[in-house]
Image (cartoon, grey):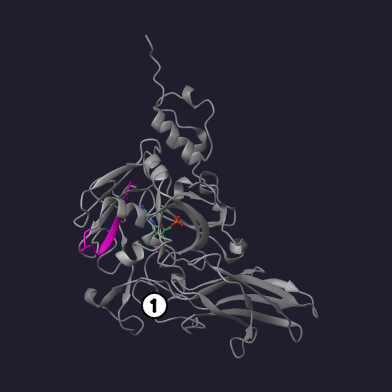
Amino acid sequence: MERRSFIKKATLSSFAALIGADIVFGSNILEGYFPIGLQDPDPFTMFNKHKEMVVLNDKPWNIEAQAHLLDDEITPNEKMFVRNNGLLPEEVNAKTWTLTIDGESVVNSKTYTLSELKSKFKHYSYQLTLECGGNGRSEFNPPAKGNQWTVGAVHCALWTGVRLRDVLEDVGIKNNAVYIGYHSTDVHLSRDPKKEPISRGAPMSKSLQDETLLAFKMNGKDIPMVHGYPLRLVAGGWPASVSGKWVNRISVRNKVHDGAKMTGTAYRVPCEPVAPGEKVKDEDMCIIESMPVKSLITYPKTGATISEGKSLRIRGHAWAGELEVSKMEYSIDFGATWNRCSIEPPANRLAWQHFSATVTFPKRGYYEVWARATDSKGKAQPMLLPGWNPKGYLNNACHRIAIKVK
Ligand SMILES: Nc1nc2c(c(=O)[nH]1)N[C@H]1C(S)=C(S)[C@@H](COP(=O)(O)O)O[C@H]1N2
Ligand SMILES: [Mo]
């Protein structure tokens, strides 16, 4: 009689996904045994993150980058921020993973396996800027509750998958479709299986864009577990909360989706500007759609010292939600005067753009380099803070670095 009971294949594959490597002798693992690689509560090891990433919260995990870590043109996994609203899915098995398309506005609901999705529809790859709606929240006054992101809740990775549009067309969408809503397998903090940590979505016009993907690869590899393995919705240029991780169901709704964090004040800002600290009624709050124009200086790191007489090459990225960035400038005199940076076109729509400039300083001393992007409709970043809002969203103030000339 076999008395030893080995862990299930599904458990093994979710262990492997979490560790980010094949567990070569995994079939020998006994039930109830937890590989030490997973007992390690260190998020840097567990999620393969760069040592300089900053952990804001561990339940749920919220981890941000620093500006200088985001220097790569395409953000690698190690430097991508993590924003979870709940606990990681408990069991993930790509082999049995399915995606169901349902809702009031589908002709007939339909379920696809992951391999059906991959074989039936054409694959596309896009670099997509995903920024948390709350990025920059820490600067608002009066302060807003929530993760106190500084500048690091943004990334631009290369996502590969099938177009949501192609899948929706395959299912058949009724004329009264208004919105899609995603559903995922992560676990509510209360562990109540009836509650979802988050279930957001997008209007049909955004859902049907070329670049809106059901992605199964990130930067050419399986999506890392913490970023949504094995299937993720990605919708660049909108608050990253629209890009549902671990997606197993998409509902096509005949009204604005009313899932978790779609209603009340979540991911909404006052429809009209308000004074700092002002109370705003729920019905006067509007859902955030395209993100505002913004930029980051990713080189050098703030605090750098250079020698007198030397010029400084600065570089970074700029993005503008659904729009392009048409002008990029820097200032070394606290915003009194501005000089042009050169800026490249995006790799594709909704990808961030790279800028650079050669900066010279008149004499020794302390300087700040400020960067300001302007979008294709002529809207520029505010120098210090944009309009206050109760939940602390959309802080697109100019990024600033300190430089000493010695
Ligand atoms: N299923 C699920 N999808 C999710 C979330 C989540 O908690 N659960 N968080 C959202 C939010 S608020 C953000 S900002 C992005 C973060 O993506 P990242 O962790 O891959 O950087 O994922 C979004 N998709
Ligand atoms: Mo977010």
Q: Image height check: is 250 above or below 376?
A: above
Task: Name the image quarter holding residue 291.
Answer: bottom left
Q: Is residue 337 left or right of residue 42?
A: right
The percent coordinates of residue 83 (x first, y second) are 43, 57
The percent coordinates of residue 389 (x first, y second) are 36, 77
Task: Name the image quarter holding residue 346.
Answer: bottom right
Q: Is residue 339 left or right of residue 231?
A: right
Q: Image height check: is 33 above or below 43?
A: above
Residue that numbered label 1 is attached to:
142
Q: Is residue 115 left or right of residue 315?
A: left
Whether residue 85 appears in this view of the structure is: no
Image quadrant where one finds the N terminus: top left
The percent coordinates of residue 110 (x first, y second) are 26, 46
Residue 259 covered by magenta stretch: no
Q: Image height check: is 215 above or below 66?
A: above
Q: Determine the quadrant in which ligand 2 lies.
A: bottom left
Q: What residue span does the magenta drawing correspond to?
A: 174-185
Mark 1 crowdedness (10 Å alpha carbons): few <14, some 14-19, many ≥20: few
